[in-house]
Image (spheres, rainbow, N blue to C red):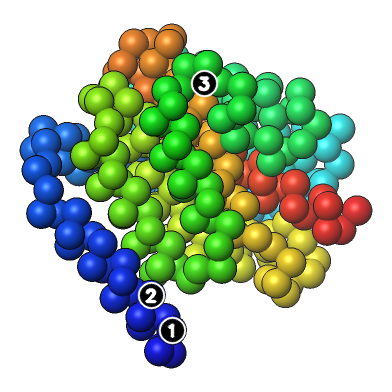
Amino acid sequence: MNKVFKYTLLVLSSIVLLSCNKPIDNSKEQSSFEFRTFGDKHNEGMSYVLNELKIAKEVGNLTMDMRTETNPLAIAKQSTDEFIMIEFCESAENQLIALTCSDSIYSRVLSCNDYRSTWFLQDDGYLSAKQKELLTCLKEILCQDYDLETTLLHFEIVRQRVTQECTDEEAEVLYYAISVGKASCIYWHDHLIEWIELLSENRERGWFSWKSVIGNDIGGAIGGAIAGALFGGGAGAGPGSISGAIVGSVSSAVSQVIEHEF
């Protein structure tokens, strides 16, 4: 670890410690902890989708022709819906909410003709100025040349700002976004090579941006959480964020392969 990196971590750690000295809403801290499980569910969903894509490839049912029903995005959408039915099997209402949000994000991605267009800050009137400010902070973190450890540390700083600066209503969507974003960082750090080998003949990883995929996870989580809350009330935001993030993640991965190889 070089001196510059050590200094960066020291400064960031100091910011976190100083912010801890400010009064913290314990109820929000508890909510933040509970929301972390949604990031874990996102990663479970991604593993489910990856396994289904591997099976499709093994039997010759995976193509990169986006006009067919055997393209990876279409298969991933079907696999996401299967995961939703399993994950929310105890609640038909949550199943319906998550499936509706999955359809909404998927349709929006296709209509944009850009499979990385899941970041909806610019045209979403449902977000407050504070939510947009902090979501933009997350987006800017992903634009930096940070490694995994530093990226996660910056996300944690934003999470503490959410706890201190946002109302309960504002915090909910942001907690989903941060939970998915942090879990996605870890997922793509661990599974990036598997996805490259699945979708591309080029086994090198330098051309594939894992941070672009994470940005779409967050964008999909935001869009899904908003759609879920609108469709099913506040409780619908969680199921919506998971399905939206998975669709957003895969859409970015597929887009990068298409741009690189075709």
Label 2–label 3 contact, CB within 8 A:
no
Residue designated by label 1: 4
Contact? badges 2 and 1 (CB < 8 Å): yes
Residue 134 visible in image? yes
Which is more foreground, mark 2 or mark 3? 2
Disc nearer the start of the sequence (2/3): 2
The picture places residue 251, in percent across and down from the top left corner, at 67, 41
> In the rendering, at what x and y percent does residue 123 appear?
61, 22
Q: Quadrant of residue 229?
A: top left
Q: Amino acid at mark 1?
A: Val
Question: Is residue 13 placed above or below 217 in the rendered structure?
Answer: below
Residue 219 picture location, percent across and down? 54, 36
Query: In the visual, does 221 lie left or right of 107?
Result: left
Is 16 left or right of 65, judged from the image as shown? left
Which of discs 3 and 1 lies nearer the camera? The answer is: 1
The quadrant in which the N terminus is found is bottom left
Sequence-first disc among 3 and 1: 1
At label 2, the amino acid type is Thr
Residue at 23% from the left image edge and 25% from the top image edge = 168
Image quadrant in which you'd find residue 95: top left
Q: As rendered, which of 24 and 77 lies closer to the eye?
A: 24
Distance in Å between CA atoms under marks 2 and 1:
6 Å
Total labels: the figure holds 3
Q: Which residue is at a point 62% across and 34% down the rendered structure image?
A: 118
- In which quadrant of the rendered view does residue 238 lie? top left
Question: What residue sits 11% from the left and 42% below the top?
Answer: 24
Mark 3: amino acid: Cys
Please give the residue where the numbered disc 3 appears in the rendered image.
Answer: 101
Q: Which residue is mark 2?
A: 8
Q: Nearer the viewer, residue 50 or 105?
A: 105
Rendered location of residue 146, percent (x, y):
50, 68
Element type at mark 3:
helix
